[in-house]
Image: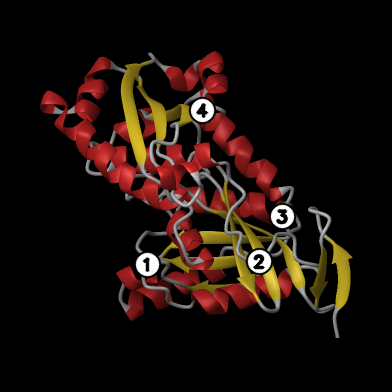
Amino acid sequence: MSETTEDFSGLITDYDPNFRAGFAALVGRPNAGKSTLTNALVGTKIAIMSDRPETTRHTIRGIVHRPEGQIILLDTPGYHRPRTLLGKRLNEMVRESLSEVDVVLFCLPSDQRIGPGDRFICAQLMETKRPVIAVATKSDKVSRERLAEHLMQINQLGEFKAIIPTSGLKGTQVEELINLVLAELPLSPPLYPEGDITDEPEMVLIAELIREAALEGVRDELPHSLAVQVEEIIEREPHNEAQRNGTEPTMVDIHVNLFVERDSQKGIIIGKGGKRLREVGSKARKQITALLGRRVFLDLHVRTAKDWQSDPKMLGRLGF
């Protein structure tokens, strides 16, 4: 038996009265495997992945569709002791996310020991009165013995709805985690149309893909100091009959600024003779082309904005 409801677009949608839908936040310290797990849960790439800490700068929202329910995932920035105004604002983003969700996924990487940061985050989560599922991420990186030890240590941290080991990279126990989350969500009609996987603006996703490409293989200092701003996306005029009649998409020009805090970092991004910046553009362009479904011209400019992480005006300009 199904019921009907009117969704946000004004369309009447059939849904099972036992259908569940709601919001789940992935929370944990930096480099806890949240972004990789988000992509595994959604089934495609939404959040950028890097082995560098503090990679995620935005709360990327992904949508998981199942016949019995729908999960809207918030992949939050790594919760940490802030050293800059940016760090404080990222932590504020995490706290705001927790106030809006139905369930929390507390990510604790299996290849790292539980430390003071994890205990601090756990205490914050227990105060939210939201159901918390503890997720031992990166389970593929450790032995069975180490994983068993890690799970016992997690159990001693607090009262969790469930504790589950997963590997976003290998897809291990991802479906089981989805079922655990769905059980905690309220009865609700679908919140997004079938097929939607994110509601993030294209500009945000494009900036994240460029930032991921720029971070690959660089020194430890750069992830904290790199910001990407998509200035504008301009659609070119049709230049052939297929584009004029709409059977072939036109090309788009994307103008982008990459901001670093020091001139020495500018050299890291650009590379000798601009080689590295061309590699960044080539890698990012392939992914952006796949995202937009059309050919892309990527115009990248690297600029120095001294101490931008502590500059309120610059943070506002960058969307923080």
Residue nearest the viewer, comparing 281 with 52: 281
Q: Residues within 10 Å of mark 3 (few under 14, many from 20)?
A: some
The relative height of residue 238 versus residue 291 in the rendered view (above or below) is above
Q: Which tag, 2 or 4, sits closer to the chain's start?
A: 4
Amino acid, disc 1: Leu
Residue type beneath disc 2: Glu
Q: CA distance from mark 2 to mark 1?
A: 25 Å
Relative vertical location of residue 202 with respect to residue 66 in this rendering, above or below: above
- Which residue is tagged 1? 169
Query: Which circle marks residue 101 in the picture?
Result: 3
The alpha-carbon separation of the residues under discs 3 and 1 comes to 25 Å
Which numbered disc, 3 or 4, marks the residue that appears first in the sequence? 4
Do the CB atoms of the residues marked 4 and 1 lie less than 8 Å apart?
A: no
User: Counting residues from the N terminus, which is met first, the one under dot 2 or under dot 1?
Assistant: 1
What residue type is disc 4 on? Leu
Quadrant including the N terminus? bottom right
> Alpha carbon of mark 4 to alpha carbon of mark 1: how far?
29 Å
Question: Residue drawn 46% across and 54% down?
Answer: 35
